[in-house]
Image: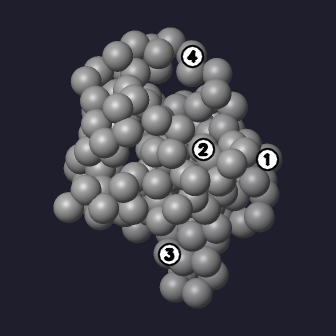
Amino acid sequence: MSRTAVLLATWFGCGYFPWGPGTVGSLAAVVIAILLHAFLNVGRITVFVMVAALLGPAIWASTETARRVKRKDPGIVVIDEVLGQWVTLVGATEFNWKSFLAGFLLFRIFDIWKPWPLRDLERLPEGTGIVLDDIGAGLYGAIILYIGGVFRLY
């Protein structure tokens, strides 16, 4: 079972990238969203459902992986970035190359910056803290992305 947890937590190996594994996880999330939109016409609601469906498994996998490597928030865990990135994309008023790029940049900014109260969310226990601070960063990104869409900036 722990192999499954590590596979999911590292987002099928993205977390093992030697430079910026969180950015690689975010990029993988955007690429998946682009492909789903291009080939299946997936929109915001489906992306939201994907986040909701993976939230519990992400917390579980993050907890198990952190325990296995004996670190509070191991860098190899990137499923939190995947979900946070998708949360940001839910804020897009339409999907196009500009909204995907803006969503990627906004999420990475908020994920790295961690404005209040995101740092407090990191203090939650185990996988809950690992995942929820990125969900929060995704919410901040979604709000800005949505406002940009309302003003037709993309």
Relative to 154, is 38 on the left or the right? left
User: What is the spatial separation of the Cα atoms under label 1 and label 3, in whole angstroms?
Assistant: 22 Å
Residue 153 disc label: 1
Callout 2 secondary element: helix
How many numbered marks does the figure carry?
4
> Nearer the viewer's eye, disc 2 or disc 1?
2
Residue at the disc numbered 2: 22
Q: Secondary structure at mark 4?
A: loop
Residue 124 screen position, x and y as percent:
29, 21
The residue drawn where x is 29% and y is 50% is 61
For badge 4, the amino acid type reads Pro
Rendering coords of residue 104 (x, y %): 68, 48
Whichever of callouts 4 and 1 sits on the residue coming sooner in the sequence is 4
Q: Which mark is residue 141?
A: none
Instruction: Single out the residue that lies furthest toward the left.
Output: 1
What is the spatial separation of the Cα atoms under label 3 and label 2, in whole angstroms?
Answer: 24 Å
Specify which label sits upstream in the sequence, 2 or 1.
2
Identify the image quadrant of the N terminus.
bottom left
For the residue pair 51 and 126, the one nearer the viewer reads as 126
Q: Residues within 10 Å of mark 3 (few under 14, many from 20)?
A: some
Between circles 2 and 4, the one closer to the viewer is 2
For mark 2, does the 10 Å Cα neighbourhood hold few (<14), some (14 to 19), or many (20 or more) residues?
Answer: many
Q: Amino acid at mark 3?
A: Val
Residue of label 3: 42
Residue annotated with mark 4: 115
Work out whether residue 96 can be spotted: yes
